[in-house]
Image (cartoon, rainbow, N blue to C red):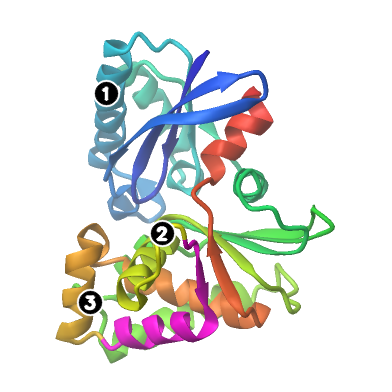
């Protein structure tokens, strides 16, 4: 059986098509639409233009799926639609325009589904998991293969960029504003108790970008999915300078993330330090695979 899953995120919308055999699956192909929905939110309201962006992405995906005769399609949204005041208005307009019903995933569910997805690839019994999105960040600590605690924070790479950065790459003032916002959201709200956890399992666009940059800078093989503490610290120091060298690296390796890579990286670094981790591991599976395993399989 073939199953399509569409994830409406705050920065990008992603379609993944799976081949399912019993309780196992394999990915047939992926497609991405850079909607940047967090950029269309003012006073916690998604604008009409933002809603149009969402259903335009879904209509593009629909054409692909109809050309392949794919009938099994599940669509869900995370912080992109749950953290706005006009959620019902948005999902109703999307349903009318694109023909898809959208399930809204809570922050806690997103954390658990992301963790469940990552564990399909990473065989670890203890550590911590983070998913940095465009408008939220989810954290799970786990022990003996079971989640211990979890939280969802209203801070992400795209909303940090919109709130704190005046240029494309953040300068010193922007870096201070970003760090203050991260600290206020993650440290001062006391939603999560951090203890020493390693490795830190990371998913999301920022994590994938960090891994690709590390592979390029340190000559790591394609089979390598981990970044050491020293390598991660070097990447953070390099990209957070905001100078031409940093911009050139991002433009060559991650041009789609020229504006969000540093805010996302600073979230990752902040959490990495709170957990006192020694290593980052990047999983290719995340919330979509967790959704597939927990809600469909």
First to last magenta residue range:
224-241
Is label 3 in a helix, a strand or a loop?
loop
* Residue underneath mark 2: 208
Q: Position of residue 245 (x, y in %)?
A: 18, 84
Q: Is residue 139 visible?
A: yes
Image depth: mark 2 or mark 3 in front: 2
Q: Position of residue 48 (x, y in %)?
A: 26, 37
Q: At 76% from the left edge and 63% from the top edge, which residue is drawn?
A: 126
Left or right side of 30 for 247? left
Left or right side of 154 for 31? left
Task: Between residue 3 and residue 242, name the one nearer to us.
Answer: 3
Is label 1 in a helix, a strand or a loop?
helix
* Residue underneath mark 3: 169
Task: Indicate the quadrant where residue 295 lies.
Answer: top right
* Residue underneath mark 1: 59
Left or right side of 262 for 270? right
Q: Is residue 247 above or below residue 26?
A: below
Task: Label the magenta part by its dominant secondary structure.
Answer: helix
Report, in whole angstroms, how far the alpha carbon at label 1 lies from the one at label 3.
32 Å
Q: Is residue 177 visible?
A: no
Q: Earlier in the sequence, mark 1 or mark 2?
A: 1
């Amino acid at each position: 059986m073939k199953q399509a899953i569409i994830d409406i995120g705050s920065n990008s919308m992603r379609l993944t098509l799976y081949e399912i055999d019993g309780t196992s699956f394999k990915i047939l192909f992926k497609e991405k639409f850079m909607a940047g929905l967090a950029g269309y939110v003012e006073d916690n309201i998604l604008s009409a233009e933002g809603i149009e962006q969402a259903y335009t992405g879904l209509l593009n995906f629909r054409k692909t799926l109809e050309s392949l005769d794919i009938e099994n399609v599940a669509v869900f949204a995370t912080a992109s639609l749950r953290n706005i005041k006009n959620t019902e208005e948005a999902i109703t307009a999307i349903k009318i325009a694109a023909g898809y019903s959208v399930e809204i995933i809570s922050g806690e569910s997103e954390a658990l589904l992301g963790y469940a997805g990552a564990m399909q690839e990473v065989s670890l019994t203890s550590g911590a998991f983070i998913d940095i999105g465009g408008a939220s960040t989810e954290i799970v600590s786990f022990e003996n293969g079971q989640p211990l605690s979890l939280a969802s924070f209203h801070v992400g790479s795209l909303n940090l960029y919109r709130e704190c950065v005046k240029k494309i790459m953040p300068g010193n003032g922007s870096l201070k504003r970003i760090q203050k916002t991260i600290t206020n959201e993650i440290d001062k709200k006391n939603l999560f108790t951090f203890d020493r956890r390693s490795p830190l399992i990371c998913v999301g666009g920022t994590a994938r970008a960090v891994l690709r940059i590390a592979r390029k800078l340190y000559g790591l093989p394609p089979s390598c999915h981990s970044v050491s503490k020293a390598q991660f610290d070097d990447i953070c120091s390099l990209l957070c300078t905001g100078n031409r060298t940093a911009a050139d690296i991002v433009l060559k390796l991650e041009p789609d993330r020229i504006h969000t890579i540093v805010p996302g990286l600073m979230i990752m670094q902040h959490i990495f330090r709170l957990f006192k981790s020694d290593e980052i591991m990047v999983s290719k599976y995340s919330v979509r695979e967790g959704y597939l395993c927990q809600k469909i399989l």
